[in-house]
Amino acid sequence: MIIEWSQLGERLASECAQCTREAVLVAPFMKAATLKRIVKDLNPLVPLHCLTRWRMEEIAVGVSDLECWDIISERKNSRFMLLPNLHTKYYRFDGIAFLGSANITMAALGWSTSSNTEALARFCIDDVDTCKKFERDLLTLAVDVTPELVSDFKEMMENFSAADTMRWGGGGQEQEIVQADEGHGSRLAFWLPRSRSPEFLYDAYSGQVDAISRDGLLALRKDLLDFDLPPGLEKTVFLNLVQSRLVSSPIIIKLDQFLTVKRRFGEIRTWLAAQLEVRDAKDEWQRLMRWLLEFLSHRYTTNTPNYSEIFGRK
């Protein structure tokens, strides 16, 4: 194993250009210009997998770009995926991998006049027994970005004001917007709501808890912990961020793919049970449906002909 700490961008771009079988880029923060510079000399026949996370507040302050999807979607043999709780920085080119602190940004890779101090450990994947499983697990948990999801994020970003952007520091400086408790960090890759009362979510967030039962408040606080939201948000901004967390959640992206037609309650209950690998998912689907109708009512609709709920996209 070799520790690299200087000219990281040139090192990754060089390895990418020499790659002949497969390239994997994993980082929570990705800037379009930096990503383009790394992959510009990659053979177009070589499969490329890009994995990142999209949080609206991070995109707003400029540490990640939606345009990264455009770069990868225009390329053959390529996938652009999301994993909401991603924090890992991992890069592999054929049998050579890098693991460390550097995101795919100019500042992290030494391509900026005010670059960060970063390091990447370079190693052969055959020398690390768990490396292949680690990568396989990441790609299994992630979901592919669709044009519809990109459109959703662009629409939500239009509702962000300059003041909202400045709330998290502005200026495009690379930083962790929220420092979550490492013992409880965001688990949106596996997320399903615990609370049956999403209409009280902002009340629980803002401390207006008099009308909420003790058990109900506990469930709401667990959901808020999973969402990993910045403190002190006004309600409209809070709702925008909750919407963004929901539409980028893997289980909801998969649900949208299942909802090519409107489905009966029992169909979705059975589908969700298969996703969760459990015998029955009645309660889980009831809770999730309430959340979708509360926060994404512009996307989903339900009606109850003949005593059976029908749920689908508008």
Image (cartoon, rainbow, N blue to C red):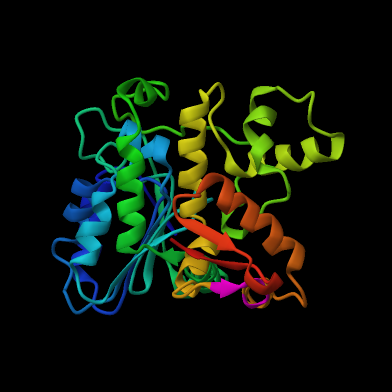
Q: Count the marks: how many?
A: 0
**On-image quarter of the C terminus:** bottom left
Residue 184 visible in the snapshot = no
Query: Residue placed farthest to the right in the image?
Result: 214
| Image x and y of residue 296, in percent | 50, 49
Out of 241 and 135, give the one closest to the viewer: 241
Out of 184 and 150, give the one closest to the viewer: 150
In magenta, the rendered stretch is 263-267
| Image x and y of residue 300, in percent | 49, 57
Out of 290 and 17, give the one closest to the viewer: 290
Q: Does 16 sit above or below residue 233?
A: below
Q: Does 4 sit above or below residue 260?
A: above
- Residue drawn 51% across the image and 32% down it: 238
- Residue drawn 36% across the image and 57% down it: 149
- Residue drawn 60% across the image and 46% down it: 186
Residue 255 shown left or right of residue 194 in the figure: left
Residue 84 shown left or right of residue 66 in the figure: right
